[in-house]
Image (spheres, helix red, strand yellow):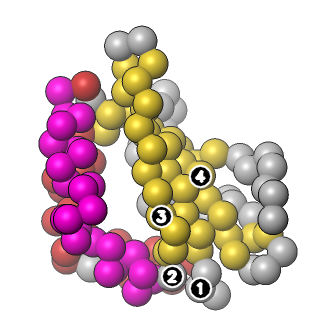
Amino acid sequence: MANKKSQRVGSGIKRVGIVSKLKSECVAKYLELHADSNPGVRDLLNKYHIENFSIFLRQIDAEWFEFGYYEYTGIDFEADMAALAAEPRNQAWLKVCDPMQLPLSGEKGWAEMKQVYYNR
């Protein structure tokens, strides 16, 4: 999950945008893993106050990029992210998904993006 630099906005919701590359040869499998019919770790995201999580995929030239967005509605982001990271099922999920991704230069995983606009 993204780091803790995001700012809370108005209602106390922390809005987080993240970006990474996806290996071209993994697109079909990644789509399969994230299909609506696959429960994945959705319940764990909700358990740790991650709501409205969406992932978008875009091919630019020969490269695939994924953009993620979620809203954190809890009160202790660091503690919730640590607890999520300790969940065995989440660890198993990341063992499958992480090797499909190519972090942007200088990053170790998803790169958090700066929020520049929000329309209520």
Q: In whole angstroms, how far apart are the C-alphas of marks 1 and 3?
A: 14 Å
Where is mark 1, residue-wise?
Answer: 74
**Residue 71 horizontal/vertical position (percent):** 59, 69
Marker disc for residue 53: 3
Q: CA distance from mark 3 to mark 2?
A: 10 Å
Q: What are the residue bounds of the magenta stretch?
A: 25-48
Q: Earlier in the sequence, mark 3 or mark 4?
A: 4
- Give SS at disc 1: loop
- Provide the residue designation for mark 4: 17
Kind of residue indicated by mark 2: His
To which quarter of the image does residue 95 belong? Answer: bottom left
Figure check: 43 above or below 41: below
The answer to which of marks 1 and 4 sits earlier in the sequence is: 4
Residue at 41 percent across and 38 percent down: it is 57
Q: Which residue sits at x=51%, y=82%?
A: 49
Mark 2 vs 1: CB contact within 8 A: yes
Indicate the amino acid at tag 1. Gly
Return the residue found at the far front: 37
As for residue 17 lying within the magenta part, the answer is no
The Cα atoms of the two marked residues, 1 and 4, are separated by 17 Å
In this orientation, which residue lies closer to the viewer: 20 or 107?
20
Residue placed furthest toward the top: 61
Query: Along the polypeptide, which appears first: circle 4 or circle 2?
Result: 4
**Residue at screen point 64% across, 87% down:** 75
- Label 4, label 2: how far apart the Cα atoms are: 16 Å
The local secondary structure at tag 2 comes to: loop
Badge 4: residue crowd in 10 Å (few <14, some 14–19, many ≥20)? many
Q: Secondary structure at mark 4?
A: strand
The residue indicated by pointer 2 is 49
